[in-house]
Amino acid sequence: MHIETARLHLAPATGVGDADGRFHIVDRHSRRTLGRIALRASRHSRARGLELSYAVADAHRRRGFCAEAAHALVGHAFEQRLTGRVYASTAWSNLASRRVLAGLGMHQLDIAMLDWESLQGEVDLGVEDGADLTPYARVEYELHRADWLARLAAHPRAARPA
C-alpha cells in the first residue's frame, strides 16, 4: 500500500507492503527520501492502539513534511478502521514534534521523566547544581478515532492538510 499527499509519497519501508507499519517519506517530485514514519504496535509497552513515530533528515526539517505524512498515515489508519487509538511520545524539549502531535488533534496525557539510573554519567543530578532535567522529560499524547472523525466532520480541512 502506498499513501499519497500533495507533496509526499509514503512508500512501505519493507518488501512486505505495510504489514509492519513502517514507511519512507518520499518527495513526490524529486523522489528523494526525506525521512521515515511508522504506525505500529509498540515494541516497548502493552498499550492498546498503534504508536506513531517519525523522523526527517536535518536538511528537510521545518517544512511540514512530518505533519503532512502523519496526517496522511493517521487518517488512513482511522478511515480503514485499523485502530481506535493512536499514541505517541516525544521529548519535552522537542517543540516541533509537539506541534506536529497537537496539530493532529492529539491530547497530551502525561509528562514522564526517563529512568534516573539511565541518566547516571550523562547529567549531574546533584541538587546543589540545579541540573535542568527538562530535556529528559517525555510528553505522551493520544488520539481516538471518534475524536479524529468528529474533528474531520467539523473542520474537513483540519484533518486533511493540503
Image: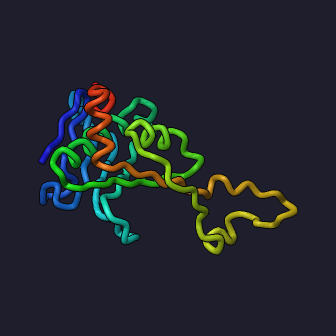
Can the viewer see residue 157? Answer: yes
Compared across the picture, whether 63 is left or right of 9 comes to right
Residue at 19% across, 46% down? 11
Task: Determine whether 56 is above or below 127 in the image.
Answer: above
- Quadrant of the rendered image containing residue 104: top left
Q: In this picture, is 154 found above or below 16?
A: above
The percent position of residue 150, horizontal first and vertical second, equals: 29, 37
**Quadrant of the image containing the C terminus:** top left
- Residue furthest toward the bottom? 117
Describe residue 137's horizontal placement relative to residue 18 as left or right.
right
Residue at (60%, 57%) from the top-left corner?
137
Residue 57 visible in rendering? no
Q: Give the percent coordinates (x, y) of residue 84.
A: 27, 54
User: In the rendering, at what x and y percent does residue 132 appear?
Assistant: 73, 54
The residue lying toward the viewer, choosing from 119 and 31, is 119
Quarter of the image holding residue 102?
top left
Percent of width and height locating residue 67: 37, 36
